[in-house]
């Protein structure tokens, strides 16, 4: 028993002497040893400057002055890491057993620079051959790989205080910065949990996060490990509960995210703050595989009042990723999300309702960058869909995008009490162009035109079809370069703002304005479009007692009309006869003028039947004479003119009156 006590006393004495010996080693010598070790691991130059001190209590620790870790050799942005100081404390007795028990790590005021080179290299990727050589066990260490894996690791507390982290991506010019970052890690047991808590500032808002990993050793070795993580950032909350592997950054679990003001968040992150308003909510089962593919299953994405559900895949590709999705929705209204903000920060419509005298299309340049972000194959079914001003009913839209060209196909789409079909194409290759073909069947024309171009002139049911192509960097340029063809056929409708029938019948150009309208049974026309001008020479309208044919053009770029219509009023039931008077329709399409076309007022241009006109004039004169004679009490004798009959009637009346007077004298 005495030898046992002596043995224990000997070990304690040996340990104490070792501590004293370690304490007597100059601090700078320890710093040099640490620098050499870090240079071997990272392959980078490491500098530890200033006073370096050691301490035995409450545990073995070393405290340094300023620390620098060199950047990758391709970077000219300065050191990758600098810090005001570093403090590391370990359990000495655990080192004797081969275990690593870190009591404390403090990294004070570090400045960390993370970079991606133009060729995709990352400055945080160190020489993997060097790292593997350092990790590999030596053959003379005894126990080899088995001994290495049996070691125990633990960290009571590791802390980063007041860090400044910058991220620079030289491929796309992106710059990000996190400031005042505080970070604490606790790992009591290598086979137990890791708990992390952190906070910082990004773009003027506070970031908070927390994470728990169930098995530290597996996580550090890159194996897929159960993980819970949550984060908050200026009104954004996100959480993930599942599994994560650092080796190939694989994960699988339930994802949930919420942002109470998407517009503010987008503005903070350098995006268009007015592009979207309202809250954002996202949830679903998220998966990332080792080849970089992302999957969202049973997903739900809500922006404001809009909500879609379905499955989304984002697959890696050679030039760009590919997005595949099958989505469904009840009501999607993007008229609110397309609002911009005025100088007071209040939302305003991106397509404001213009005064009737105002013309002009938006001249803002349309960016095509989004067309090159990803290839896509997305199907969307919605019970109601509002795109800008266009209102669609039960809709199925299939979107295909490849290398900057997107095709939106309308299938089984209800709209304006009718149906729409066709496709719309946006092509960003070599400049922006838009084109496609659309067909509408039995649609309600008035609300359609109001929603598209604020035109309130026509009402009724109709069909139309159009094939078009427009080229330009803005809506204004596209409309000035519009080309293609179109056909229109309307039934049982009205042209508001003018009564052509009364205008012609009464030769009265004032039959226009509020409350006036021309009823028609049918209206047809075909148009050829080139350089923003749509021309027709076969306009034909028919109504009860009125027909009209015409030619003209629509200046799509300037939003102007110029039509010459030749209506025929007072037409007989068999279609013959009638009075033809040409009418000119000219001016901005929101408020054109209607006036009699004096230039065309001659019998040849109007194709007037002179004999029929003479009969009508003769009949009108006879009627006028009869009305005059009746009112004056004149009775014409056969062959007697109205003038002679009037003179005779006056003489007879005067004679009778004179005889009465004379007779009264007797």
Image (tube, rainbow, N blue to C red):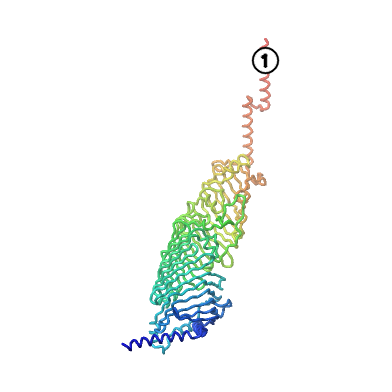
Residue 141 visible somewhere in the drawing: yes
Image spot of residue 37 (x, y percent): 49, 84
Residue 637 visible somewhere in the drawing: no
Image spot of residue 212 (x, y percent): 41, 71
Q: In which quarter of the image is the N terminus?
A: bottom left
Furthest-top residue in this view: 666
Furthest-left residue in this view: 1
Q: In which quadrant of the rendered view does residue 483 lie?
A: bottom right
Question: Relative to residue 441, is residue 434 depicted above or below?
Answer: below
Q: Residue at x 57, y 67 (%)?
A: 429
Residue sitting nearer the eye, 409 or 258: 258
Q: Which residue, given by chain and number where applicable, does mark 1 sit on? A: 659
Q: In which quadrant of the rendered view does residue 75 lie?
A: bottom right
Residue sitting nearer the eye, 375 or 589: 375
Question: Relative to residue 388, is residue 427 depicted above or below?
Answer: below
Residue sitting nearer the eye, 123 or 356: 123
Image spot of residue 192 (x, y percent): 38, 75
User: In terms of secondary structure, where does tag 1 sit?
Assistant: helix
């Amino acid at each position: 028993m005495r030898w046992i006590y002596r043995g224990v006393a000997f070990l304690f004495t040996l340990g104490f002497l070792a501590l004293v010996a370690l304490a007597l080693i100059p601090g700078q010598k320890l710093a040099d040893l640490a620098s050499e070790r870090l240079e071997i691991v990272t392959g980078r130059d490491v500098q530890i400057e200033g006073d370096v001190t050691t301490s035995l209590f409450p545990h073995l620790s070393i405290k340094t002055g300023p620390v620098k870790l060199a950047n990758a050799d391709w970077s000219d942005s300065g050191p990758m890491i600098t810090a005001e100081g570093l403090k590391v404390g370990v359990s000495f007795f655990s080192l004797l057993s081969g275990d690593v028990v870190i009591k404390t790590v403090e990294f004070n005021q570090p400045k960390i620079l993370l970079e991606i080179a133009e060729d995709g290299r990352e400055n945080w990727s160190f020489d993997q051959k060097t790292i593997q050589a350092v990790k590999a066990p030596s053959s003379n260490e005894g126990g080899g790989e088995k001994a290495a894996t049996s070691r125990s690791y633990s960290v009571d507390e590791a802390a980063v205080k007041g860090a400044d982290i910058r991220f620079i991506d030289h491929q796309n010019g992106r710059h990000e910065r996190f400031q005042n970052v505080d970070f604490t890690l606790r790992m009591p047991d290598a086979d137990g949990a890791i708990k992390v808590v952190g906070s910082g500032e990004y773009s003027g808002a506070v970031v908070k996060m927390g994470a728990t990993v169930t098995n530290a050793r597996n996580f550090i070795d890159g194996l897929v490990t159960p993980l819970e993580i949550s984060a908050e950032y200026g009104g954004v909350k996100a959480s993930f509960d599942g599994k994560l592997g650092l080796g190939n950054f694989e994960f699988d679990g339930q994802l949930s995210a919420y942002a109470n003001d998407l517009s503010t968040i987008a503005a903070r992150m350098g995006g268009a703050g007015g592009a979207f308003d309202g809250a954002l909510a996202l949830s679903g089962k998220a998966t990332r595989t080792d080849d970089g593919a992302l999957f969202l299953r049973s997903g739900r994405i809500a922006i404001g009042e809009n909500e879609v559900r379905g499955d989304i895949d984002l697959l890696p590709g050679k030039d760009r990723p590919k997005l595949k999705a099958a989505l469904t929705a009840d009501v999607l209204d993007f008229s609110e999300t397309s609002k911009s903000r005025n100088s007071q920060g209040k939302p305003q419509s991106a397509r404001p309702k213009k005064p009737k005298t105002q013309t002009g299309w938006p001249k803002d340049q349309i960016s095509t960058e989004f067309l090159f972000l990803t290839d896509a194959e997305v199907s969307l079914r919605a019970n109601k869909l509002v795109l800008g001003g266009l209102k669609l009913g039960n809709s199925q839209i299939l979107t295909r995008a490849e290398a900057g060209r997107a095709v939106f196909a309308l299938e089984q789409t209800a709209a304006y009490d009718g149906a729409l079909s066709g496709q719309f194409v946006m092509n960003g290759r070599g400049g922006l162009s838009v084109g496609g073909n659309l067909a509408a069947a039995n649609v309600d024309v008035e609300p359609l035109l109001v929603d598209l171009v604020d035109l309130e002139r026509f009402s009724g049911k109709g069909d139309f079809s159009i094939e078009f192509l427009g080229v330009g960097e803005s809506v204004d340029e596209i409309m000035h370069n519009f080309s293609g063809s179109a056909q229109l056929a309307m039934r049982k409708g009205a042209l508001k703002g003018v009564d052509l029938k009364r205008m012609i019948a009464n030769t009265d150009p004032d039959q226009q304005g509020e409350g006036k309208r021309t009823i028609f049974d049918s209206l047809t026309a075909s148009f050829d479009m080139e350089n923003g001008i749509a021309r027709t020479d076969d306009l034909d309208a028919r109504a009860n007692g009125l027909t009209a044919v015409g030619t003209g053009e629509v200046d799509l770029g300037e939003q102007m009309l110029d039509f010459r219509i030749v209506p025929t009023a007072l037409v007989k039931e068999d279609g013959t006869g009638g009075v033809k008077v040409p009418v000119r329709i000219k001016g901005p399409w929101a408020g054109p003028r209607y006036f009699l076309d004096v230039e065309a007022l001659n019998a040849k241009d109007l194709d007037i039947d002179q004999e029929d006109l003479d009969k009508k004039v003769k009949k009108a004169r006879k009627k006028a004479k009869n009305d005059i004679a009746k009112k004056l009490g004149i009775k014409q004798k056969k062959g007697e003119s109205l003038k002679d009959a009037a003179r005779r009637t006056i003489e007879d009346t005067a004679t009778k009156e004179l005889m009465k007077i004379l007779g009264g004298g007797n």
